[in-house]
Image: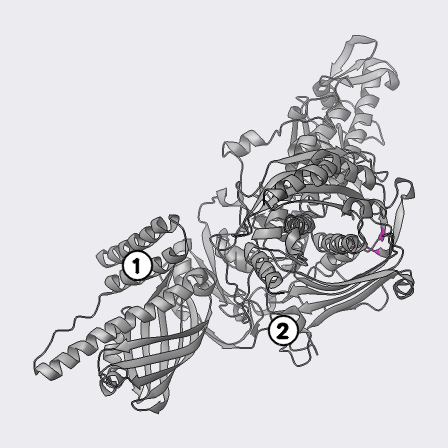
Amino acid sequence: MKIAGEYVFNGPREQVWELVRDPEVLATALPGTQSLNPVSENEYEGEMHVRVGPVAGVFSGRVVASDEVPPESYTLTVEGKGAPGFAKGTGHVQLIDQGDGTTLMKYEGEVQIGGRIASVGQRLMDSASKSMIRQGLEALNKALEARVAAKSGGQEVEYKPPSEAEFAAAVAKDMAGEVLLSSRLIWIAVAVVIVIVIVAVILIGRGG
Amino acid sequence: MTEKYVGQRMTRTEDPRLLTGQALFVDDVEIPGMLHAAFLRSDYAHARLRSIDVSAARNRPGVVAVYTAEDMEDAWKPCPPLVIPPPTVKGVLFHARTQVPLVKDKVRLLGEPLAVVIAESRYIAEDALEDIVVDLEPLEAVVDLEKALEPGAPLVHDDLDSNLAAHLIQKKGDYAAAREKADVVIKRRIVIDRCAAGAMENRGIVAYWDEKSQQLTIWDTTQAPIPIRNGLAGMFGLSSHQVRVIAPFVGGGFGPKVMMFYPEEVLLTWATLQLGRPIKWIEDRRENFLATTQERGQVHDAEIALTSDGRILGVSHTFIHDTGAYDPYGLTIPLNTQSHAMSAYDVPNYYSELKVAFTNKMIVTPVRGAGRPQGIFLMERLLDVAAKELGIDRVEIRKRNFIPPDAFPYNHEIIDQAFAALVFDSGNYLAGLEKAAAMIGYDQFIKEEQPRLRAEGRHVGIGIVSFVETTGVGPYEGARITVETDGKISAATGVGTQGQGHFTSFAQVIADQLGVSPRDIRLVTGDTSEFHWGTGTFASRGSVVAANAIHAAAKAVRTKILKLASKVLEAPEEELELVDNQVRVADIPHQSISLGELAVMANPLRGAVEPGTEPGLEATAYYGPQYGATASGSHAMIIEVDPETMMVEIKRYVTVEDCGTMLNPLIVEGQVHGGVALGIGNSYYEQLIYDENGQLLNASLADYLIPTASEVPRIEVGHEETRSPLNELGSKGAGEAGCIPVPALFAQALEDALADYDIEILEAPMSPNKLFALLQGKEKE
């Protein structure tokens, strides 16, 4: 599966760079990340709870950053596996200073997916992964905005990362929106059901 | 005989039990102390197994055992091949590589089992799978069947030089010479991809070794209980009389359930022998996609040579058949393709070159149709292209080439899947096609209705194709029939039953011989303790091979009844008749004796049974055909295509089937309906999509589209009855017929509906997406 996209951050490039290289912030930006620990300067190990369609489970894996050109670009290599299957991917991230205090992020990469997540979740994979990336970047941007505000105002601005439930609901809503653009009314019902089910499962999981 | 049951549209005697939930399926088997198995399956299609650590899983509460290949020690060995390659063809190359119970060194297909957990419940067993730590080194996967044979391709089996599993050439006449003389030669590339069988009931096994009685009992959703019994007994050093395999009611077989031995069958048997406790495993739907065999992947480079008036001079095709990671089923499927690519036509010259490729995909074994749909698709498509090129009507070009009714037995001069000469025993192909054309109103539709609809801007097309089906191949089946002392009849045969209505149609055969009602007959199928000689349910052979064995056994019992009754009633046998559960003197109806009383007399408690006679009114008989009976038929349909969404509506669907003597036309029609439904799936909805790494992308019924009631139209069934001269009942098989011509028919009808786009459909399955792409391609031209 190929992944490519762009995102504009409301902050200067150096700060975006710091942010995306900070494992703690990254961990909060993709809720479901249960841990992300540096094993060396450019290598992290962690666990992430992933849900695509009917498939859910914990992935454990490694993230390696390489070819770093601060604050312009780097390459991320991700390898993870768990009960839902495995994923292996390489992505190239580029940060472009737009000159107006914003930063354009361009990313492209290729991911190989296998196991249950590929065979059962395939239909939802494309939109789910796009949406997860978008939601993750939104969260990062909010964290960035908080940092920028803190710097300029000289005071702490509270940044509250999204909870796993909020994140999942946002992903589902996002995916439903995408589906709606191209399909029929019945999908509204399907999308609503997906959102309800995901939220319910998470709530039940937490309650239990 | 006052009433004749064979040929009657009797409703099925087994249905009340099935419809009220009283029939036994494997998952209904509950035994005290029963354990449950779950399998750890590879997430990679091709990988080297570096290590596997099951210690955490073993320590989970409720887990009884966890086994890997290493734990099996000497019991670990590749399963024996089912079918050997044809010994009668010269120069045949065949590398037998068979499936293993658990991966030892290398994973060769997605979902191949790495370990099995046996636990107090399936829940615990599934949870314990997640405790297992596996280190797999991914290898480049072999997925595309043409790339598989290219030099330098990764090897599925490291001990072979290439992925070529088999190579075989079959010839009739001299195709090259025929091609020289031809007015027109048409060359096309035909691509057919994989489908799943999609039985409603997934596979399931309960295995129970009872240490005290030294008996192994296995309930298995198999189509071939007797070979399973024989094989498992052999594998584990037991006498075949210590092993009882029961195939109870099975919710659909369609071929893959005959593939023995599945790793699960071997493992559950081995595990119960270790543990002495009953173990159950029921396949889940995703496992069914990954662990149950599939069929149909073939690529053909095909040619047909004709005269200008549309007479076939020869057919040639070179093709690659995808056998998946192993080839336990030998060459059955591609041999079927080879023997159906000439179909119902008088083809004087034929060249067929087969290459079989190993790939990192699920093992290929027959799925209803079993290579025949590919052969028929090839021939019918070539004829359609030829008809268009030569300006001959589709029906007319077929009529000009049919094997005439007086040419039977017709020898095609190659060998078939049973390694016998491909001889068609009988048929009347022209009559079948004409009847189908008349039923659907072919001429009227083409001349009047279609022009009117086209003028309205509608895309409505008609298709009409013919096919043959070799059925009822050997080696043999048997049956035992007993008159009980209450006058009821017990019968047993070795074939398993998966919904074919055996309990009714076989009973009809017996009833006619013994003068009883089919409802007085208790029939057992698929239980090796009831009958333990036989092969299985496949190749549309139940109504041919098993039914004729039953017929022979019933006749033998009838002979015994008449002999004894003749003494008791003091009347010559010729004057006796069997009516209403009694034997009576035809002219003196009150001079009679019931079958029950006669059965008591045949097994006396005192007195002496004459030397050289057997007690009881019981007989066992066997039937094995010299070669298969050839069924045939024609299908026609009218289809409307929405050129915006590419969705189709089948407006009418007509079939004419010739399966010889119909034991029960209602059951034949049911078989045809089911076959057509499967064929529609194979034509336009179903396709197993593997990515370049061998990942199956649509392993769920949400993504893999099996036709539902809304896609399957009302099917009108007409009949021709050309009795098979090979057996006494005159029957031919009907189990697979319904699905065989459908992809060819669909392609032709779609082309006709979209005539203004002038497309050519050379692949199956099609789909709305593929049709859209074809039309897009045409618009760009």
In the rendered structure, does residue B416 fall within the stretch colored magenta? Answer: yes
Q: Which mark is residue A173?
A: 1
Residue at 42% across, 66% down: A126
Residue farthest to the bottom, as pictured: A69
The residue lying toward the viewer, choosing from A204 and A172, is: A172
What secondary structure is found at the residue carrying circle 2?
A: loop
User: In the rendered view, would you say A53 is above or below B541?
Assistant: below
Please report the bounds of the magenta region as a residue range.
B415-422
Q: Which mark is residue B156?
A: 2
> Measured from the top left, where is residue B189 in percent x and y?
72, 64
The residue lying toward the viewer, choosing from B644 and B317, is: B644
Subunit of label 2? B
Query: Do we see residue B570 in this rendering?
Result: yes
Residue at 83% across, 47% down: B627
> Measured from the top left, where is residue B191 in percent x and y?
67, 62
Task: Judge depth for marks 1 and 2 and give the one in front.
Answer: 1
Subunit of label 1? A
Image side of residue B251 versus residue B590, left or right: left
> Measured from the top left, where is residue B568 in percent x and y?
81, 16
Q: Amino acid at mark 1?
A: Lys
